[in-house]
Amino acid sequence: MSRPTPPLRGEHLASRNWRHRLDPLLGQNAARLAVNDPRVLPDHAANLPECLGRHIHPTACDAGRSTRLNDSDAARYVRRISLMHSNFSVKKEHPRLYSSKQNMFEIIDVPRAHFLMADGHGDPNTAPEYAEVVTALYTTSYAVRAVAKDELKRTHTVAPLEGLWSAKDLQVFHTREKGRWDWTIMIFQPDWITSAIVESALERVQEKKDLGAVKKVRFEEFLEGTCVQTLYVGPYDEEAPTISRMHDEFMPAEGLTPRGRHHEIYLSDARRTDPRRLRTIIRQPVESARK
């Protein structure tokens, strides 16, 4: 008697939930085959839509025939099918980048990613431009999500708002002269979002909304590399002591010096959250002070 193929560890391939997820994609018979022997990629894979095939197993899809996979390939194959129909959240997929511990500084490596961005200048509390840009970014981000769902059958949670801050004279951050601040506001986009999808989304927004600031929105790659970050909880105007400890105590002790722009990630909705409970990731790109 032949031994049955055990399900892949952690994938729960034999469960009905997996069968229901696979059936719409591969057809009922193919789904049952994949569940019973996850190392077989069925013929039906050759007929998958292009947007699915290229994310699963391009070689097998091109060959148009059943292909024997090893366990690691099978795990990736089934996981990718699952991800196609699961909701992506950047906070869940990249917890180190979008969470931190309060009153503790950590050194992290921030990989390359794509964002919707828009630039501006002035006090974020009073400058009309800031509010207009934030509205345009969120509106475009939700339009991008809708286009990706229509065209790729993939969904994601719109990511938190982020801001890059700078000024010609850095003292204005200590003196809180906000009218002299330069800023870039941005929202992370999943790696399957392309320039074409963003262009389609912008067209939808311009057709339906009268938002002049949409013209300022761009889709851009951004790489920070090595950074120091922490979680700050409290009003935005009381961040200064935390930032000072980061720059004046932690960085020198680690042999680091700041480079690039001050970065904040706003985890809370400021419109609905008590200022004392606002959660903000404070991040600063760094480099070695010993050159």
Image: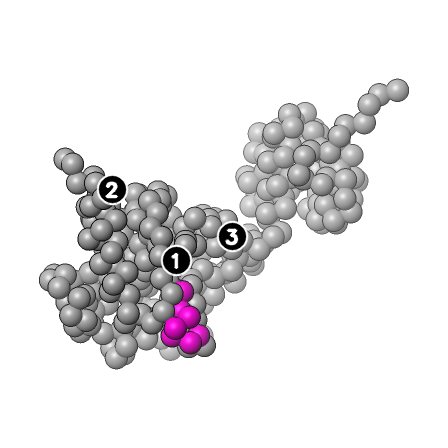
The magenta segment = 273-279
> Disc 2 residue type?
Glu
91 vs 135, nearest the viewer: 91
Q: Residue at x 21, y 40 (%)?
A: 255
**Residue 92 - label:** 3
Q: Residue at x 57, y 29 (%)?
A: 59
> Disc 1 residue type?
Gln
Q: CA distance from mark 2 to mark 1?
A: 19 Å
- Give the structural element (helix, strand or loop) at label 3: helix
Residue 155 can be seen in this image: yes
- Mark nearer the viewer, 2 or 3: 2
Q: Residue furthest left?
A: 169
Q: Residue under label 1, please give it.
A: 102
Hey, which quadrant is residue 188 in on the image? bottom left
Q: Residue at x 47, y 61 (%)?
A: 158
> Disc 3 residue type?
Lys
Instruction: Check if mark 2's residue and mark 1's residue have beta carbons within 8 Å.
Output: no
Q: Residue under label 2, please give it.
A: 254
Q: Residue at x 46, y 49 (%)?
A: 94
Which is more N-terminal, label 1 or label 2? 1
Q: CA distance from mark 2 to mark 3?
A: 29 Å
